[in-house]
Image: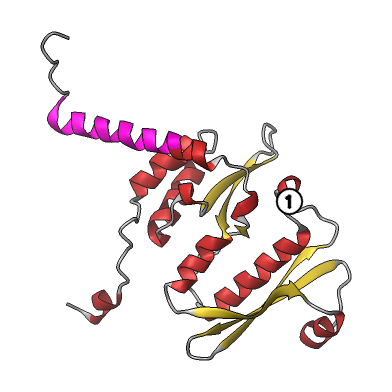
Amino acid sequence: MTLEKRLQPKPPASAMTREQAMYLLTTIYPKAPVPERIKAAIVCAQYHLNPLMRQLYLIPFNEGTPKETWVMVLGIKAIRQIAGRDRKYTYKDGPRVMTEAEQKSILGQAEPDRIWSITVLKDSDGNEYPGYGFWPRGVAAYGQDKGNSSINMAFIRSERNALDKMSPGALPDIEVSDETYAAINVPEALARGEKEVIRQGEIDIDELFGPAPEQEGR
């Protein structure tokens, strides 16, 4: 066994295959373009994510218009989960809004048109990783009608920046949001997804062994 193989992390028992993720994504987002579903399925399989566990979303913008686009978004808990596989960490400071003095000290100037946030992580070895992120002031955040806010988005971006510094190269370069405000009915999607997996399993069995024989008297 090579050193490279020994160092490969063992996938969790609940890890999904690309095919399983594709079944669920197709069930949850039937209107999403196939290429976007395929890309999302690859990400689910590569990073051991489950779209039914508030970890990955496909969000439509300009829906129903010629400019309609679908964007893959990860929940902040998914990013924490991926980073936490590398090392244990705690929050030394934040996430919180940066003061004007901090903006001038760290960024070189204060930016009143942006809400800046800071998050400082500390790993089990005592190393610290400051992260910074902003959201344009006055720009509505996705899910704002459900309670999300511009400040919360700034918090998420600063935390993501700190996690990137702590685990360089380990996190996918995908937009991150707060899964609390995602526009998806998880229980309903879970029920649809389970039915789809069962249905596909029955199809696979039929293809391998042929359809089940009719019971007598039916």
Q: Residue at x 42, y 38 (%)?
A: 193
Residue 19 lies in the magenta stretch? no
Q: Residue furthest left?
A: 216
Q: Amino acid at mark 1?
A: Gly
* Residue nearest the viewer, comparing 39 with 161: 161
Image position of 42 with respect to 212: above or below: below
Q: Quadrant of the N terminus?
A: bottom left
Disc 1 residue crowd, few under 14, some 14–19, many 20+, Cα 10 Å: few
Quarter holding residue 154:
bottom right
Check the image and report above or below for 54 versus 156. Answer: above
Please identify the dominant SS of the magenta region.
Answer: helix
- In the rendered view of the protein, which quadrant contains the C terminus? top left
Q: Is residue 67 left or right of residue 98?
A: left
How many numbered marks does the figure carry? 1
Percent position of residue 74, x then y? 55, 56
- Locate residue 81 relative to residue 154 in the image: left or right: left
Residue at x 55% of width, y 48% of height: 57
Which residue position is annotated with label 1?
Answer: 147
Residue 30 screen position, x and y as percent: 50, 34
Q: Secondary structure at mark 1?
A: loop
Image coordinates of residue 16 in percent, x first then y, are 35, 52
Tell me: 186 left or right of 66.
Answer: left
Residue placed furthest toward the bottom: 126
Classify 86 as above or below 14.
Answer: below
Q: What span is colored magenta in the figure?
A: 191-210
Q: Can the viewer see residue 183 in this picture? A: yes
**Image point 79% across, 52% down: which residue?**
140
**In front: 50, or 7?**
50
Q: Is residue 194 magenta?
A: yes
